[in-house]
Image (cartoon, rainbow, N blue to C red):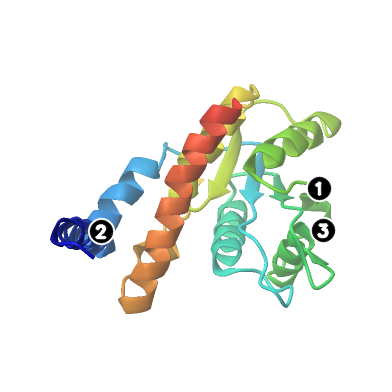
Amino acid sequence: MNKKLRKVLFVTGAAVLIVFAILYLPFTQRRLTRILTVEEELLFAEAIVVLGGGLESDGSPKVSTLERIDYGIHLFEVGFGNYLILSGGAKANDQVEADEMYKVALDKGISPEAVLRETKSQNTYENVLHTKRLLSQHSIKGKVILVTSPYHMQRAVSCFKKQGVEVLPAPVNNSEIYAYGFYQNLRNLRLLMHEFLALVYFRYAGWI
């Protein structure tokens, strides 16, 4: 390996490490999260829509799914909506995302009659399409409250707006993205980078 090539590799490696170190910092992650978060004053809406965040390999809800359904249930219990719409068709170990959220809601005392499930969607764009159809089927009109993780909110809101559905964004206020630690910072970094890349892809696809 010649001297020039070694220098190029060294500089490239150093640059990558510096960028990683900056992105790993809680301060940077807070700033990036603020860029991705959309929030408005909440008002009563007929429905509270909760977007799933995936399932673990054993079929149990991932942390992002649990924080979203917990916050959606909280908003429902304090009177912000008449219906709780659970959207998510991801599957793992014969379990379906929306069904797992439904179980959590029932365990916390939510009436089955107040819960609607959307079990077909495989991504945020499909969340919107199938939820919009569900709203129409149940004659739910006007704005809906949209619950998802803070880092996911900008993409979710943009998808709903693209499909003509007005939402009141309600990002989870105690999301894991606000927790920090050695491993959590690595997870936060992955979540944030995935979201920025997804925004680019969704815009390219014409979904937002």
Which residue is painted at 60% across and 68% down in the image? 62
- Which of the 4 quarters of the picture holds residue 140? top right
The relative height of residue 110 versus residue 165 in the rendered view (above or below) is below
Q: Which mark is residue 120?
A: 1
Residue that badge 3 annotates: 112
Can residue 167 be spotted in the picture?
Answer: no
Q: Please say if 93 is above or below 150.
A: below
The secondary structure type at the circle numbered 2 is: helix
Real-space CA distance between mark 2 and mark 3, rounded to the nearest whole angstrom: 51 Å
Residue drawn at point x = 22 percent, y = 56 percent: 12
Q: Which mark is residue 176?
A: none
Q: Residue sitting at 47 percent across and 55 percent down? A: 172
Residue that mark 2 sits on: 16
Nearest the viewer among 105 and 68 is 68
Q: Is residue 160 found left or right of 121 in the rendered image?
A: left
Q: Nearer the viewer, mark 3 or mark 1?
A: 1
Give left or right: position of 81 versus 136.
Answer: left
Query: Residue 66: horizontal and vertical position, in percent?
Result: 59, 66
* Coordinates of residue 101 in the picture (x, y in percent): 71, 63
Provide residue 77's location: percent of width, then percent of height. 61, 57
Pointer 2: residues within 10 angstroms few (<14), some, or many (20+)? few
Mark 1 neighbour class, 10 Å CA radius: few under 14, some 14 to 19, many 20 or more: some
Q: Give whichever of 142, 132 is nearer the camera.
A: 132
| Dot 1 amino acid type | Lys
